[in-house]
Image (tube, rainbow, N blue to C red):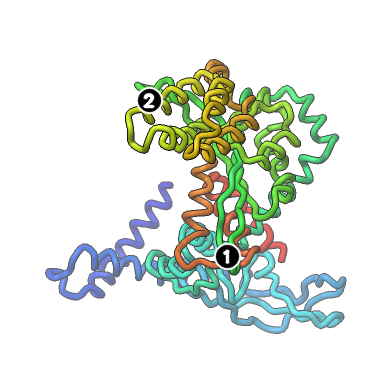
Amino acid sequence: MKHGTEIRDRLAEVLVPAIEELLGDLEQVTAGEIERVIREVLQGIGNAVLAASLERLEGRYPAKTVPCDCGGHGHYVCRRRGMLITVFGRVAYRRAYYLCSRCHRGQYPLDRRLGLRPGQVSVALAELLALLGVQTAFEEAARLAEKLLLVRVSENTVRHETQRYGQLQMDREAQWQEESEDIERLLERARSRSERPKRLYGSLDGVMIPVGDEWVELKVGCWYAVKQRAGPLADAKKATEIGYYCDIGSPDRLRPLIWASGYPRQADRAGEIVFVADGAHWIWRLVSYHFPQAVQIVDWYHAVAYLAPIGQALHGEGTAEAAQWQESMRELLWQGEVQTVISECRRYREHPRAAQAIEKALSYYQNNAERMDYARFRAQGYLIGSGVVESACKQIGTQRLKRAGARWTLEGARKTAKARAAWLSQDWAPLTEAHTLLAQAA
């Protein structure tokens, strides 16, 4: 660190006079102008230093021959110019070019060793563009890149890099699936004495997004832990260590991912698994398929939402009688008295204004009665709200994929959603590492 400080101080001694010369009349200059000029100068210095560093890494005297993938040898021809789009702008550099006399293929050993992709963005810039691309529309992300990074790229470049990260996430999911279906690996994990989750939560939900000329459902899932809040809300609970996953298509397409995404979270070793979601049949079918032992809880707020239309139909919208009826039914649900609420609703099945709302409520409550034992769930300390996955649907589907005017291809939407899910899960670093390794292997 000491040497770094010394280098910084020496550079400052050289740069300050040069920057003052660029600024002109120092009595008229503003702080903003000083920052702007320094930033542009440092960008240019970074560009020059990166170009020189790349050339120095190869050395002054290139080898006469290098091995070729065909088994032959590439012979040195000359130094050729390459260009990279980097965080310092477009960087030009020269490196050795070799041509194989056997297969007649050319190669640049320096590019391969460092994972450089001439004519394309660097790995470092690709990560930043992907981060912008998961946050906002690709066109807007390109404008932000120019403003924030002083690098001009097209919206197609942002799209490409964002969806490349989505593909990397899909590759990770495929690896999870392979590992999670390895019986020997699972048995070995089961025998392990390492710490395991005591209680692991899961949730599933869906949100409609535009794909082509249609609307399709993006299915979203998450895994998380729950801890008590401190302070005056000590009885409230907070989701932590949240990890998201998603896919587009039928429930059966998501089915393998539910188990695979739980593997890194040790869902197969958890002492207890608790799923909280709304009453959609496809959700509980998938949960029962993979985790038949899981505690199943229907989201409290979805259950309560069926009461208001009935109360208003019976007693009039906004009346004290309607509010009183809703509150009494709400309290019964809170205490786990689902059958009592069902019986009360049945009394009004013939009511001309309430019949439709009552049939919806009865269907929901009868199909999910065992998942609505809220008194027992609360006594055992379970979270009974599915706000975590509903927030995931908003953050991944609504905020990113349902922007005004957005129309997606199926794969574009899928990859962008998966990249955003990885970022929101704070699980981005493995994708950047994989991107680097792929570039070096190319």
Q: Residue shown at 68%/38% (left/top)?
A: 262
Q: Which mark is residue 324?
A: 2
Residue 154: image location, x then y, percent: 50, 74
Position of 440 with respect to 352 (left or right) is right
Name the residue located 62 percent from the left edge and 71 percent from the top edge. 117
Q: Say few, some or many: other residues with alpha carbon within 10 Å of mark 1 (under 14 / 14 to 19 / 20 or more).
A: many
Q: Nearer the viewer, residue 221 or 155?
A: 221
Which residue lies under the disc numbered 1?
Answer: 161
Q: Which quadrant is the C terminus positioned in?
A: bottom right
Image position, residue 223 (x, y; %)? 60, 37
When the figure is inspected, residue 282 is found, relative to residue 137, above or below; the finding is above
Corner quadrant of residue 248: bottom right
Q: Amino acid at mark 1?
A: Glu
Closer to the chain start, of discs 1 and 2, is 1
Q: Secondary structure at mark 1?
A: helix
**Quadrant of the image occupied by residue 194:** top right
Q: Which of the pair 104/5 is nearer the observer?
A: 104
The disc label shown at residue 104, or none: none
**What residue appears at the point 35 percent right and 21 percent down from the top-left corner?**
232
Q: Position of residue 294 (x, y in %)?
A: 68, 28
